[in-house]
Amino acid sequence: MPIDLTPIPSSSNTGGMNKAKLRELTRFYIDKYDDSWIADSDATRFDIDDALDLALKRWYEATLCSRATYTLAAVSGQSVYARSAFPTGASRIFDLYLVTFDGSTLIPTSVENLNSLNQNWRTATSATPRYWMPWNDTDIRLYPTPSTTDNIIIEGFQLPDYTYFDADTDEPPGVNIADHDALTLYAAMLVTIGEPTDENAARQSTLYTLWTSKLAKARARVSGKKNVKTIMGRRLDRSRSKWNCDETITMA
């Protein structure tokens, strides 16, 4: 028998839902089925605020709703740059897809590609970079090594800044007003996982189905795929750059 998750409490906020309202709605989904063991305190098995924070993180990852660019002056003779060296916020990028040097887009590559063409590329003479690649999990490496101090600009999808989602009056940053309530679906699902009952298992399935429906609509809106024109029978999506390590590389 399907679990009914309606009606929901109405919000007195004429705009979006702030964290206090999101917490209230999350509790509604939980308490509707008499899970009295869940309370809003630090002593809960899984705090509802923590669950809302994780839901916001997952929303950013799944919808790619937040792009950002960060700029850093290169250091002559330095090839590796940590994201933490860029302005505050760059460390929140989880999908880096574009790097430019002095206004020119660099070609993404890999260690394997460079090794196959020139095993001495690491010690090559400094020059104007033409390629970039991930170096460790949080750094990037440019090739050739920069010989000037021109700007490096990175662009990617980033995770939320939780300092803007801390107070009860804060609304979810970067989330469309129509999707605020979606965070409560994922948060309620996370919280109820701590009580493995048949009823909760059924509830989690229903919550997850509603969550994924919201995600699908948001993805289409964010990517612009609803408005992509059809040209010669093909749908073109230029909403983001694609990482392609099969580029043909010429050595400087």
Image (spheres, helix red, strand yellow):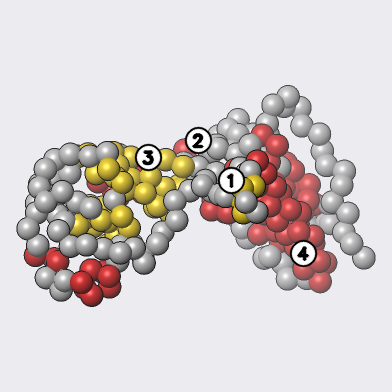
Label 2, label 1: how far apart the Cα atoms are: 24 Å
Q: Are the residues flagged by discs 2 and 1 in contact, CB closer than 8 Å?
A: no
Residue linked to disc 1: 223
Observer-nearest of 136 and 55 = 136
> For residue 189, which numbered disc appears in the image?
none
Ranked by sequence position, the earlier of labels 3 and 2 is 3
Observer-nearest of 50 and 108 = 108
Ranked by sequence position, the earlier of labels 2 and 1 is 2
Label 4, label 1: how far apart the Cα atoms are: 27 Å
Q: Nearer the viewer, mark 3 or mark 2?
A: 3
Residue linked to disc 2: 164
Label 4, label 2: how far apart the Cα atoms are: 30 Å
> In the image as oriented, which residue stretches furthest toward the top?
14
> For residue 69, which numbered disc appears in the image?
3
Label 1 CA crowd tier, 10 Å (few <14, some 14–19, many 20+) = some
Ranked by sequence position, the earlier of labels 3 and 1 is 3
Q: Is residue 131 above or below residue 223?
A: below
Quadrant of the frame with the C terminus: bottom left
Label 4, label 3: how far apart the Cα atoms are: 37 Å
Amino acid type for the residue under numbered disc 3: Thr
Observer-nearest of 121 and 233 = 233
Q: Nearer the viewer, mark 4 or mark 2?
A: 4
Ranked by sequence position, the earlier of labels 4 and 3 is 3
Amino acid type for the residue under numbered disc 2: Tyr
Which residue corresponds to the image point at 27% horizontal and 73% vertical from the top-left? 112
Percent x, y for residue 186? Answer: 67, 54
Residue linked to disc 4: 205
